[in-house]
Structure formats: structure tokens, C-alpha cells
């Protein structure tokens, strides 16, 4: 409990959309995003209500592609 | 397996006959002949639009349900007596009193016979109308109906409560698979079907996310159109999406929306509720519903199990099904097929049980223009085999499809291009239809 609290109190790096998008693709379909996917994702994240919502939606979408379902 | 068949489905005898005709210069080409053979010379006149398949998993004893032998010796007869029904001359087990009052609605097929005493094989034979082959997987009735009759936009064509079992689509492919509800309805609890229940997510969320997926799902490109699994997934993805958004779909599965009059015709157990769900789904446009009632594999203590559990459950659910279909005006357009995978040994075993026995069994057919209130076929004095001509699973399925306006000899192609008829043998039973 104390350990978790200490972790949560640590200063966090600012939200880096580029890094997060790349991470989302690597962690779901095991590849980096293509040029067009990257641009699309940046636009989608910017348009979302909060960054967290945006990333959540992106993760959900990636997990529901046929690419993920068939290949991974 | 017939040993005079060529692997392309043409019997050598037919081939020779055609050859002889061509030889006489009558200009009757093989092409024409095959085309005529494919239609089977049968014109399916049926007008039924939907079907319900009640699977009695385990293999119910014909001797203790719909084909009693009160005059058989003690070793065979069993503990139950037959009772009269509302149809003269038609008698069924005393523990099915509600069904006895609905006997005018269904036909009992006795002396149904095959040779496969194993659960999976028997189930496949009864559920596809084709004797199982190791080299080819035949599609279940639901898959064929799904392909022939198609689905309405917001509901699946083929629903199974709770599931259809292994490889139901056979060579037809994923697109014609069932929507497995995954659970059976319970009285008093809303039925939460995975994939339908929204659970706090709004429709706006659903739409937004769906658009997102479309944008990112381009990795397969055009290849996706040619692959059966991918296009099946697409097809299902679209359907799932349509179903999730549809109020109609949600209400069809919501049993609390049913009127009290109808609900009171059923019992409170899961099988009865599944039957009620089946009538609702058919009413809303689903084309084929499978309902399951298992527990019939009574190798031990057959009579107590039947008397205390299986028969009352079957009685409540199935009578409710027939009466509700009739009350809603759906019986004329809905075929109902009730069957297990085989019958059970006429001679009672030392554990008061009966074992697997495919040589004699029963099935029920009703609705969809099939003439109910009669018995077709007969088994011998001790229930050990058909008395005269056997009714085969092929014949029953041919009757089933004929009622639905589907030609049982219609030819499909497997993914490798092999032509296969829906059911090669079996002819519609004339006392039932046609």
C-alpha cells in the first residue's frame, strides 16, 4: 500500500502521443504503425475527449481488427 | 458406405445408362443428365419459413416415451404405461400428459433406424441427414437453412441455445454458423447474452469505436475478400454490430416482454424457457433455432430419471412450444423436428437402465405443413427394430427440407469444388408432406 502510494507520487513524464501510439501498435499487432496509420491515430487522439479516452478507444479498435484477431 | 459410387457422386450404374442412351444417338448428353439428376426430380412444395430443432442429447429411450410396448415381456416392457392422447389411436407415455393434449399438432415417427451407436456419430447423422464420413463434414440443418433462407438484417438466421456443438457448418463454412447464446434463459433474470448486452456503453460509443476499427483494419487489403475465414469474420462483425444496435434484437431475447398468457404455458426450468425463447425468436424473424435438452443417456436408473426429471421437463417445454406456436399462428410456417441420436435397448439392463440402440428409435416432426396427429412407421413387437420398412434419418431430413421449400437433392460445392447434394439418399415421407 505504501509502496503503491510512493509510486503514484513520483513525478510523471508529460503525455507523449507519438510514443504512446507506437506502443499501442507494438503491444497489439507487434509492429510499428505505418505512416498513414500514425497520422490517423494522432488525429484521433487529438479529437478525443481526454487523452486517456483516446488511447482507450485506440487500443480497443486495434484489438478488434481482423489483423489482431487472426494473427495474434 | 455404398461401393458403387464414383467419388463425384454419380453412380456407375447411372453413368452406364447414360452412355447407352448416348450410344443410340439420342443426343442426351451427360451434362443434361447430371443437371436433371441434381434437381432430383423433386419439386419442393413446402412453404414453411422457419424451423425449430429440439435436440434430446444422450439418446432418449423410445420404449419409455413415444413407442411403448405394453404387451412386451417383463424383461423389455419397462415400468411405464401408455396413455391415450387427443388423437384416436395415438398413445404415448403416461408421464407426458401435457403432450398427450397436444398430440394433434405433431407426428410421431416410429421404427426410425440407423446403425451408429456412438453419441457423436448418431448426432451427426440425425442432425445433417447424411451418414457421417471421415472425409467430408456435412453441414447441420441450421446451416443449410441459414444459407437457403437467409437472415433478416437485425437478427442472425441461425441461433442455438446454448450452443450447436462441434463444426456445425461442415463444408459450407463459417458464414453459415449459429449464433450460440452461450447460456440458457433463467426465469426472473434478464438474459445477458455476451455481445448483445450493452452494459453501460452507449450507442454513441459503439458507433464511434466501430468507425475507428474500420479505419485501422486495412492490413489484409484485398486478400480479405478471398479468404473464407476473413470474409466470415467480416460478415459476422457486421451482423454483431447490427444486432448490438438493434432494439428489435434486444427485445427478441427479452423474455420478460412476453405476455402472461404465453408464459404460463411453459414451465420455469431452463428448457421450458429456452422453448419460449425459441418461439419469440421465430416470431421476430430468426429462421432456425436449436434448443437442447440433455440427460437422456440413462444407462443406469432409467425409469426414475425419466419419471422424475426428463419426462416432466420435456412435457412442459415441448407442449408449451407447440401450443404457443399454434396460438401465435406460427405453426403452419414453422417446422419442428425433435430427436435424439438413437433409441435405447429394449431389454432393460441389470442396472435398471437401457443402453445405446440405434436400430429402433423415434423422432417427432410437426408444423410447416407437416400433417400432425398421426403415427408414421412402426417398430416390431419388442421395439427391437423396424417392423417393415425402416424410416431413415435421410428420409426425415428430406421431409424436413421439403417442408421448407428446399430441394433435398440440391447440389452445393465444397471449398475444393466437389459437388455434394444436401442429402443424397432419403425421400420425403408421403404421409407427412406432399
Image: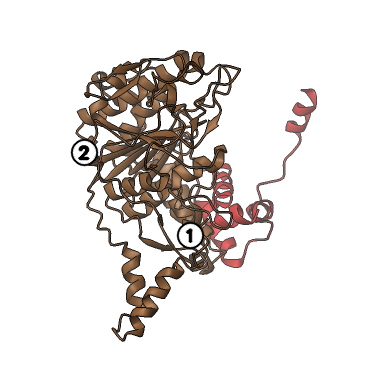
Q: Under tag 1, what secondary structure?
A: helix
Rendered position, A59 above or below B356: below
Give me the C-alpha separation between circle 1 and circle 2.
35 Å
The red-tinted chain is A
Is residue B208 visible from the viewing direction of this image? Answer: yes
Q: Which residue is mark 2?
A: B332
Q: Position of residue B409 (x, y in %)?
A: 35, 59
In the figure, what tint was chain B given?
brown
Q: Which residue is mark 1?
A: B231
Rendered position, B420 above or below B30: above
Left or right: where does residue B271 sit relative to residue B42?
A: right
- Looking at the image, the residue that sits furthest to the right is A3
Chain to which mark 2 belongs: B
Rendered position, A11 above or below B98: below
Chain to which mark 1 belongs: B
Q: Position of residue B61 (x, y in %)?
A: 47, 26
Crowd tier of the residue under label 1, counting other residues whose Cα lies within 10 Å: few below 14, some 14–19, many 20 or above? some
Marks 1 and 2 share the same chain: yes
Judged by depth in the image, the label closer to the viewer, 1 or 2, is: 2
Amino acid at each position: 500500500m505504501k509502496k503503491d502510494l510512493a509510486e503514484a507520487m513520483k513525478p510523471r513524464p508529460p503525455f507523449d502521443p507519438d510514443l504512446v501510439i507506437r506502443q499501442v501498435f507494438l503491444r497489439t499487432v507487434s509492429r510499428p504503425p505505418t505512416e498513414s496509420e500514425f497520422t490517423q491515430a494522432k488525429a484521433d487522439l487529438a479529437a478525443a475527449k481526454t487523452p486517456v479516452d483516446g488511447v482507450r478507444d485506440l487500443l480497443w479498435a486495434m484489438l478488434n481488427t481482423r489483423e489482431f484477431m487472426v494473427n495474434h | 458406405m455404398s461401393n458403387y459410387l464414383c467419388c463425384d457422386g454419380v453412380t456407375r450404374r447411372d453413368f452406364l445408362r447414360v452412355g447407352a442412351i448416348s450410344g443410340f444417338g439420342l443426343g442426351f448428353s451427360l451434362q443434361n443428365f447430371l443437371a436433371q439428376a441434381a434437381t432430383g426430380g423433386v419439386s419442393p412444395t413446402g412453404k414453411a419459413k422457419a424451423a425449430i430443432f429440439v435436440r434430446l442429447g444422450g439418446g432418449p429411450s423410445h420404449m419409455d416415451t413415444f413407442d411403448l410396448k405394453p404387451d412386451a415381456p417383463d424383461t423389455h416392457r419397462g415400468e411405464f404405461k401408455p396413455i391415450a392422447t387427443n388423437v384416436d389411436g395415438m398413445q404415448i407415455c403416461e408421464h407426458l400428459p401435457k403432450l398427450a393434449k397436444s398430440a394433434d399438432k405433431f407426428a410421431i415417427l416410429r421404427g426410425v433406424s440407423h446403425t451408429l451407436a456412438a453419441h457423436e456419430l448418431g448426432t451427426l447423422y440425425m442432425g445433417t441427414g447424411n451418414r457421417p464420413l471421415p472425409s467430408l463434414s456435412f453441414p447441420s440443418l441450421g446451416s443449410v437453412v441459414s444459407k437457403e433462407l437467409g437472415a433478416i438484417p437485425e437478427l442472425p438466421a441461425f441461433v442455438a441455445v446454448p450452443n450447436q456443438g462441434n463444426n456445425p457448418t461442415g463444408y459450407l463454412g463459417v458464414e453459415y454458423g449459429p449464433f450460440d447464446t452461450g447460456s440458457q434463459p433463467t426465469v426472473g433474470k434478464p438474459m445477458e447474452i455476451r455481445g448483445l448486452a450493452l452494459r453501460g456503453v452507449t450507442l454513441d460509443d459503439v458507433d464511434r469505436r466501430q468507425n475507428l476499427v474500420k479505419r485501422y483494419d486495412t492490413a489484409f487489403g484485398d486478400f480479405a475478400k478471398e479468404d473464407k475465414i476473413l470474409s466470415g469474420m467480416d460478415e459476422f462483425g457486421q451482423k454483431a454490430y447490427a444486432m448490438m444496435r438493434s432494439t428489435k434484437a434486444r427485445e427478441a431475447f427479452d423474455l420478460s416482454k412476453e405476455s402472461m398468457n404465453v408464459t404460463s404455458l411453459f414451465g420455469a426450468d431452463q428448457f421450458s424457457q429456452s422453448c419460449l425463447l425459441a418461439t419469440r425468436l421465430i416470431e421476430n424473424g430468426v429462421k432456425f433455432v436449436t434448443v437442447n435438452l440433455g440427460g437422456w443417456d440413462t444407462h443406469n436408473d432409467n425409469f426414475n430419471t425419466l419419471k422424475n426429471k426428463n419426462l416432466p421437463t420435456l412435457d412442459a417445454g415441448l407442449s408449451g412450444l407447440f401450443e404457443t406456436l399454434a396460438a401465435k399462428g406460427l405453426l403452419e410456417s414453422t417446422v419442428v423436428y425433435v430427436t435424439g441420436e438413437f433409441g435405447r435397448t429394449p431389454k432393460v439392463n441389470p442396472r435398471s437402465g437401457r443402453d445405446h440402440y440405434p436400430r429402433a428409435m423415434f423422432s417427432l416432426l410437426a408444423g410447416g405443413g407437416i400433417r400432425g396427429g398421426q403415427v408414421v412407421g412402426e417398430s416390431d413387437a419388442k421395439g427391437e427394430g423396424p417392423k417393415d420398412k425402416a424410416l431413415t434419418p435421410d428420409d426425415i431430413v428430406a421431409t424436413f427440407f421439403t417442408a421448407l421449400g428446399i430441394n433435398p437433392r440440391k447440389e452445393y460445392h465444397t471449398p475444393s469444388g466437389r459437388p455434394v447434394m444436401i442429402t443424397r439418399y432419403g425421400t420425403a415421407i408421403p404421409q407427412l408432406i406432399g
